Image: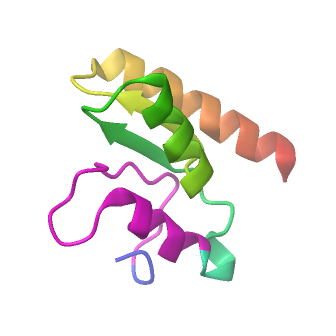
Amino acid sequence: MLESEPVDVLVPDVGMSEMDGYELIRRVRGIARFANLPAIAATGFARDDDARAAMEAGFSAHIGKPVLIEQLAEVIDEVMRVQHESS
């Protein structure tokens, strides 16, 4: 889907069934044109260790579920701002 659709930010669930979010982000980061794509790990695992693992895997941010749309919008704004500043 990333290859065929324009994407501004990726927000996968970490606990997907066939491939977890950590493997997904490793694969995405391995594609040169998506190396800096803002990506937010959405997960029910919201401990500090979980956030650290998400960042180490290559996510731009981590957000615990359940999440309010306002919280998600704030995190999206932040990762987009950081990405814009670093370009």
- Of 82 and 43, nearer the camera is 43
Residue displayed at 30% across by 62% down: 20
Give the answer, above or below, for where 39 lies relative to 80.
below
User: Can residue 7 be found in the magenta stretch?
Assistant: yes
Could you tell whether 22 is left or right of 8 in the image? left
Q: Position of residue 8 (x, y in %)?
A: 52, 55
Q: Residue furthest left?
A: 17
- Of 29 and 72, nearer the camera is 29
Could you tell whether 49 is left or right of 31 in the image? left
Could you tell whether 14 is left or right of 60 in the image? left
Residue displayed at 41% across by 44% down: 41
**Corner quadrant of residue 78:** top right
Residue displayed at 41% across by 29% down: 63
The span picked out in magenta is 5-29
- Of 15 and 70, nearer the camera is 15
Give the answer, above or below, for where 54 lies relative to 30.
above
Q: Position of residue 15 (x, y in %)?
A: 23, 51
User: Can residue 11 be found in the magenta stretch?
Assistant: yes
Q: How many marks?
A: 0
Residue displayed at 37% across by 16% down: 70
Q: Residue furthest front?
A: 49
Give the answer, above or below, for where 44 lies relative to 58.
above
Colouring scheme, one of rainbow, by chain, secondary structure, one colour = rainbow
Q: Position of residue 55 (x, y in %)?
A: 58, 44
